[in-house]
């Protein structure tokens, strides 16, 4: 057998933009498709239940080694592999590091991400791509899909908490799925971030932008709420602020009172993935408390641990999109949607952009080898 040359495509951030990574409508369609594949089982992710979010490097709270990074909010390294079937039939992994001090101390985004795609049969690399925009867009279009299936059809107001990178994408994902939207409330502990956000989005959407100094004011009149904040100040939501019929989406950590979780319908993007986090948390030396600062499902873990919630009542968006579970049961339901992010989403959006990049001849072709040195 002749030894085969292996080449792959490198796609920089400008290449990804050219390939359409910022196209919210297209990305929402691909995320909708991804949830159909998840609901029908045409995927494999890591872990014993094939549903793992990924493998995380846990930094210690203290270390005798001066160079070893220490634990902190959103401080992690993560590798997230998945195979996805359907029209994608591809394997891939997202690999990233996150440090909340990057923007203010180093002129870098909070997290820096790459996606590598591989042939599902041979393992040959197809592409290595810049994934900051890919990841932000796939993350933001998930609350968009949740809005499509779970929000009231007459929803007209949105509340956005945290006006950073991920929220920019969440707001776009939600807005394209709210045909009757009229107002958007924006809240950030740094007011300038909310102002910048409002200026940017008002160029794309005809929506009244209202910047609020209090968290409460961004929530009380909102039919859809999106939380994607990062940092040491937790987002604490009072249950009385949630309007009847609203959809509350948490893409980053948000603290809702216990009653909120018990009284309302809670929908996860894909519960088996959160369940693995729960089991990992139980095995961690600090128990499920170790998941408090980063797992958006932490409060459900606590309720399960204390016997105050029951797994049978938990719904996954993937089951809703394929019709296995109903969406909202009444117009007055308040729905809490929790998105943890799935590696399958990175692979489907990454593969879609890779196909487009190949069509347009974008990026650089790199050679792994002309002939493998050892066979
Ligand atoms: N579920 C997923 O798939 C997924 C994927 C990526 C990131 N995330 C999460 O999204 C969150 C946001 O990430 P990002 O990249 O946008 O971070 P970022 O640093 O770009 O932005 C965070 C913003 O939140 C604001 N903020 C912090 N605390 C706040 C508070 N208490 N109230 C209001 N605003 C507050 C900050 O000022 C900042 O503007 C992170 O928690 C991250 O883990 C989730």
Image: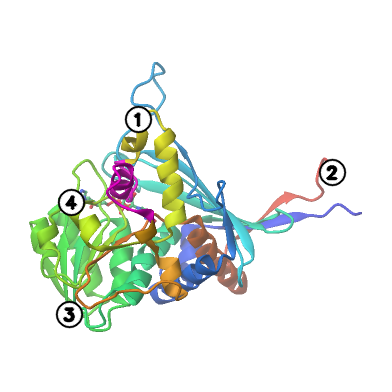
Residue drawn at point x = 71 percent, y = 56 percent: 7
Q: Which residues are magenta?
A: 292-311
- Residue designated by label 1: 286
In contact (CB < 8 Å): disc 3 and disc 2 = no
Could you tell me if the residues under marks 4 and 1 are in contact, i.e. CB atoms within 8 Å?
Answer: no
Which residue shows up at 33% across the image and 26% down it? 61
Q: Is residue 102 left or right of residue 208?
A: right
The residue carrying mark 2 is 375
Asked if residue 299 lies in the magenta stretch, the reply is: yes
Quadrant where the C terminus sits is: top right
Report, in whole angstroms, how far the alpha carbon at label 2 lies from the one at label 4: 58 Å
Q: Identify which residue is drawn at 59% across, 57% down.
A: 44
101 to the left or right of 182: right
Q: Is mark 2 within 8 Å of ligand 1?
A: no
Identify residue for label 3.
182
Image position of 80 with respect to 120: above or below: above
Q: Nearer the viewer, residue 268 or 147?
A: 268
Distance from Cα at disc 2 to Cα at disc 1: 46 Å
**Which numbered disc, 2 or 4, marks the residue that appears first in the sequence?**
4
Number of marks present in the image shown: 4
**Corner quadrant of residue 146:** bottom left
Q: Please report whichever mark, 4 or 1, sits nearer to the chain's N-terminal start.
A: 4
Q: Residues within 10 Å of mark 1 (few under 14, many from 20)?
A: few
The residue labelled by disc 4 is 257
């Amino acid at each position: 057998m002749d030894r085969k040359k292996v080449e792959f495509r490198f796609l920089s951030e400008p290449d990804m933009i050219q390939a359409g990574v910022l196209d919210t409508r297209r990305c929402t369609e691909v995320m909708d498709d991804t949830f159909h594949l998840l609901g029908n089982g045409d995927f494999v992710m890591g872990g014993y239940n094939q549903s793992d979010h990924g493998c995380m490097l846990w930094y210690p709270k203290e270390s005798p080694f001066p160079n070893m990074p220490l634990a902190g909010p959103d401080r992690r390294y993560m590798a997230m592999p998945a195979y996805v079937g359907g029209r994608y039939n591809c394997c891939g992994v997202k690999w990233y590091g996150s440090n909340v001090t990057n923007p203010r101390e180093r002129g870098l985004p909070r997290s820096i991400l790459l996606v590598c795609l591989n042939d599902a049969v041979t393992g040959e690399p197809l592409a290595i791509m810049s994934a900051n925009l890919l990841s932000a867009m796939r993350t933001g279009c998930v609350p968009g899909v949740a809005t499509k299936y779970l929000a009231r059809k007459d929803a007209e107001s949105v509340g956005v908490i945290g006006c950073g990178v991920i929220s920019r994408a969440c707001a776009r994902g939600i807005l394209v799925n709210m045909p009757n939207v009229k107002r958007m409330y924006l809240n950030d502990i740094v007011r300038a971030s909310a102002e910048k956000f409002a200026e940017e989005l008002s160029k794309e959407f005809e929506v009244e932008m209202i910047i609020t100094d209090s968290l409460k004011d961004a929530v009380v009149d909102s039919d859809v709420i999106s939380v994607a904040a990062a940092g040491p100040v937790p987002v604490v939501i009072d249950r009385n602020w949630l309007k009847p019929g609203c959809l509350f989406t948490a893409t980053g950590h948000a603290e809702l009172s216990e009653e909120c979780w018990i009284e309302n319908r809670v929908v996860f993007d894909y519960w088996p993935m959160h369940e693995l986090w729960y089991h990992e948390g139980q095995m961690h030396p600090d128990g499920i408390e170790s998941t408090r600062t980063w797992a958006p499902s932490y409060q459900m873990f606590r309720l399960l641990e204390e016997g105050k919630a029951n797994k049978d009542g938990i719904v996954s968006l993937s089951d809703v999109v394929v019709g296995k579970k109903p969406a909202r049961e009444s117009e007055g339901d308040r729905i809490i949607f929790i998105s943890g992010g799935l590696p399958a989403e990175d692979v489907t959006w990454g593969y879609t952009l890779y196909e487009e990049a190949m069509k347009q001849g974008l990026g650089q072709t790199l050679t792994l080898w002309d002939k493998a040195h050892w066979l």
